[in-house]
Image (tube, rainbow, N blue to C red):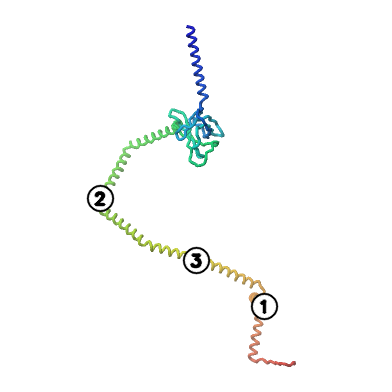
Amino acid sequence: MAPKRSTEIKVGVVTLLSLILLIIGISLGRGWSVSGLQNRINFRFPASGGVEVSSPVMVNGVKRGSVVSVANDKGSVLVGATMDDLSDFHPDAVARISMLEITGGKKIDVYPGKLNTAFNPESEINGVLASDATELIAMVGELGGDAKLLIRRLDTITAAATALLADGKVVAQLREAVQNTNQFVTSLNSFVEKNKPELQVTLNNLRTLSEDLRKAVQVNEPKVRELITKLDATTVSVQNLITKGESAIGNADGLVSDVRAAVNDLKTGSGFVTKLLYDKGFANRMDSAIIKLDAFIEKAHEHGVNVNLRLGTRP
């Protein structure tokens, strides 16, 4: 009996040690890959979004690697991963953290990009977080208070509507409004039925008028264009005339300036005209000389002039 029990104890100890070693191996081997060449790549996300070591990395829905590290870095989360191949990656590649399964788990979806330039494995791929069921549940929880308030307001509105409809006067007014609307619609239908030929004639006349207007526009379009061309030419001529008028006004301004300068010179100068116009003493002397000359001419005309002229000899 004792050897049998000893054997059972040994078997139990070996089994327990095997399970412990298996658990340790699984814990240490998470994220390890048995493939040949592994490429290290980094992703930067605003938050981890539930990604952890050994989370799969998908490229267009195909698993190409797994996460090996998740760490906070410079106000965001830096996620390191190993991937089998990066040959189809481009500089405009983007990543997104989304749900792996409906029951839980996260994955990184990578979209390689389309630029023709080569991808640098040392660079970081920026990523975003996709909304999942947990976030939606949290949003619904946040909206719970608003939903309660909305239900209370709807209950208040329903109570007010019930009280309003309980008033017989309001119901009677509503019925009267419905009856009036029904009568109006009936009268309108009757009017249309009675005047249907006239309405049809009116519509035909409007159609004919629109066709005549269209034809008139088509016929007179060349004349209108010619008129517009002439108006444009007239506008150009008027603009040229205005330009010449502005030039003439400028010349007139120059002439006025010259006249002002000449008048100023006459006022301030010392010439004969200035003295004649502005020197009263000179003007008086000129008047006296003219008077004397006039008197001399009159006497000469009346008595004549005795001229003693000797030519060729001295007196």
Q: If you read the primary sequence from the N terminus, does the residue marked by circle 1 or circle 3 appear first? A: 3
What label does residue 79 carry, if any?
none
Q: Give me the C-alpha separation between circle 2 and circle 1.
A: 110 Å
**In front: mark 3 or mark 2?**
3
In this view, the residue in front, 137 or 250, is: 137
Q: Relative to residue 247, is residue 174 depicted above or below?
A: above
- Which amino acid, mark 3? Asn
Q: If you read the primary sequence from the N terminus, does the residue marked by circle 2 or circle 1 appear first? A: 2
- Which amino acid, mark 1? Phe
In this view, the residue in front, 40 or 295, is: 40
Q: What residue sits right under mark 2 in the picture?
A: 193
Work out which residue is located at the far top of the displayed protein and give it: 1
Q: Quadrant of the C terminus?
A: bottom right
Q: What residue sits right under mark 1 in the picture?
A: 282
Residue 82 in the image, given as x and y percentages of width and height: 52, 31
Q: What residue sits right under mark 3 in the picture?
A: 240
Residue 215 in the image, given as x and y percentages of width and height: 33, 60
Quadrant of res 162: top left
